Image: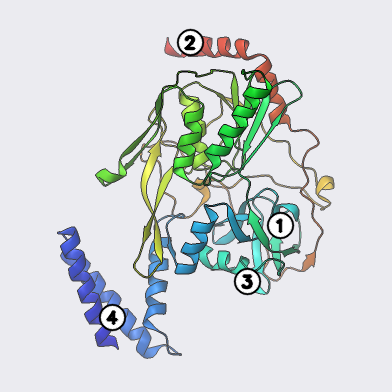
Amino acid sequence: MAIGVVVCLMVVQELAVRRAQAVSESSYDELETFANVLTIVQKNYVEPVSTKQLINGAITGMLASLDPHSAYLTPDLYKDLQIETRGSFGGLGIEITIKNGVLTVVSPIEDTPAYKAGIKPNDQIIKIDSNFTKDMTLTDAVKAMRGPKGSKINLTLHREGVPELFTVPLYRDVIKIKSVKSKQLPSGYDYVRVSTFQEHTDDDVESALKKFEKDHHGKIKGLVLDLRDDPGGLLNQAVHVADDFLDGGMIVYTEGRLESQKQKYLSHKKDDFADYPMVVLVNGGSASASEIVAGALQDHRRAAILGTQTFGKGSVQTILPLDDKSALRLTTARYFTPNGRSIQAVGITPDVVVEEPKITPAAMEIPGEIDEDTIRESDLPHHFTNGKGGKQPGAKPASEHKDGGKSHTLPLSQAKPAKDVQLDRAVELLKHWKSYQEQLAKSENLAAK
């Protein structure tokens, strides 16, 4: 079997040479080392292990060493990804990452079991049922949390400010994400919330805008676009949504090593464009596609960006299908705002900074002080910089926990402040839009002198 593996690897090497037309001698040496290690493992490991298992493990480790967003997708995970982008999948509804070796929550998705159970950003997932998550890959964690509707799962969590581990029981559900919600605000302004960018998000945004125009006899007084805790999604949907609010010009462009990875996405000129006042809400959970929209509207001065610094994921992942129905999710380019800003590991800085109020321990029914620090791209292991020498935010230390800490079941609630101060401030900004524009122009003139 070992000889067959070596022969197989030699064939792969030869194919790679033909495709790339230039492979250094060191590549052959490294592949020979890999083949030798694989042979030794198969011959000496305490139990028999298949070649496929070892190769899959090697591929997974190779991609995980590149950056936090590149990954090997098994056929099942690739199928799940395709389902997710259509807005329906089975599970808990939770965005996760690995921070300093610990499986950590980025944000729960609205109206899902995780959200309703009170799971919060920055919670550390210590165990999934009886399995510790230490050294568990994101792929394995996602697989463990997926399951049939109605099946029970227990997540053991550590939260900053809570002295003991606690267990949250959840029941899996079919996660059907309605990515767009809209309403009219009491002040006569309109509100659109985009929770994720999936298929048909742009259609839903356009439908909401058309309804607003009809309700207001053809004219929107002012709009709040809420992208808080929006983890991103499909690039083309971000481009379409940004296009809805722009009258020509650049939306975003990408740069990679290959010419095919250098793309420009432009807005269309419109005969009936309405330049009504607009505020975009963002926070540390706004990432990727939501940052594309916020960055484009900010650079074109189409909207005021209000809230806190965004996540800082300025990279493009390309899905590359493989012959066995698996796929690679590979980071292939950086994206740039119209003014040439790469926000990778930096994020979008709001025009108007408004911090979210901290939730008190009493509201959470948990003793101790609650730390609302947000995970950002610059906190993740193997993240790369924006390539422009931009200042990177300092990484926050990981929360500590004791492996032998006592675990107890704790009822949680998705506690929120009584008032949404960021939304209230956005409405105030719309009410005084002319004054804001005048102050902005004065500031730009002073900066130019």
Q: Residues within 10 Å of mark 3 (few under 14, many from 20)?
A: few
Look at the numbered disc 3 and give the secondary structure of its residue: strand
Give the residue type that dot 3 points to: Phe
Q: Which mark is residue 36?
A: 4
Q: Quadrant of residue 171?
A: bottom right
**Counting residues from the N terminus, which is met first, the one under dot 3 or under dot 1?**
1
Measure the alpha-carbon separation of dots 2 and 1: 50 Å
Q: Residue at x 71, y 52 (%)?
A: 115
Look at the numbered disc 4 and give the secondary structure of its residue: helix
Measure the alpha-carbon separation of dots 4 and 3: 32 Å
On the question of residue 159 being in view, the answer is no
Give the residue type that dot 2 points to: Leu
On the question of residue 143 being in view, the answer is yes
**Counting residues from the N terminus, which is met first, the one under dot 2 or under dot 4?**
4
Position above or below: 440 against 278: above
- Judging from the image, the colouring scheme is rainbow
Q: Which mark is residue 446?
A: 2
Give the residue type that dot 4 points to: Asn
Which of the image's four quarters has the N terminus? Answer: bottom left
Measure the alpha-carbon separation of dots 3 and 1: 21 Å
Is 234 in front, or is 231?
Answer: 234
Left or right of 254: which side holds 115?
right
Q: Which residue is mark 1?
A: 113
